[in-house]
Amino acid sequence: MGRLIAFIVLLIPGIMAAYGIKLMRDTLFNKLLEPYPALWLQFTLGTIFVVLGIGFFAGFLLNRDRKKGTVSKRFQK
């Protein structure tokens, strides 16, 4: 059960990061999607989604590796 919860916790930010990449790609190809009024806003939100999604995933892995003790000395608390 714990692994399923961990998978779901990692799946949500992964989907968010993928959607952010899609938003940025659509902006570069000059395709404005429906809920966004301007291309610059679409690109900005896409960048925020990517940074938050990858940042959460990286923080999750860093926290897990700190608990195991497999990180280098500069990443230990």
Image (cartoon, rainbow, N blue to C red):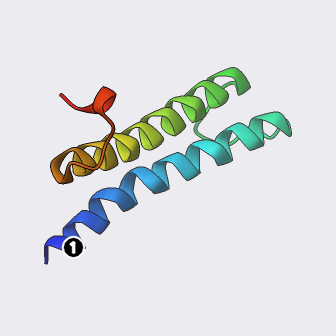
Residue situated in front as seen by the camera: 66 or 23: 66
37 horizontally vs 51: left or right: right
Q: Residue at x 49, y 37 (%)?
A: 49
Q: Position of residue 31 (x, y in %)?
A: 80, 41
Q: Residue at x 64, y 31 (%)?
A: 42
Q: Is residue 15 above or below residue 58?
A: below
Q: Residue furthest bottom?
A: 1
Residues packed near mark 1 inside 10 Å, few (<14), some (14 to 19) or many (20 plus): few
Residue situated in front as seen by the camera: 60 or 64: 64
Disc 1 marks which amino acid? Arg
Residue situated in front as seen by the camera: 15 or 61: 61
Q: Position of residue 75 (x, y in %)?
A: 30, 31
- Image quarter where the C terminus lies is top left
Give the structural element (helix, strand or loop) at label 1.
helix
Q: Residue furthest right?
A: 29
Q: Residue furthest front?
A: 73
Q: Which residue is mark 1?
A: 3
Q: Residue at x 13, y 78 (%)?
A: 1
Q: Residue at x 33, y 37 (%)?
A: 72
Q: Quadrant of residue 9?
A: bottom left
Q: Position of residue 36 (x, y in %)?
A: 61, 33
Q: Is residue 72 above or below residue 37?
A: below
Q: Is residue 16 above or below residue 59?
A: below
65 horizontally vs 12: left or right: left
Q: Is residue 42 above or below residue 58?
A: above
Q: Position of residue 32 (x, y in %)?
A: 74, 37
Number of labels in the image equals 1
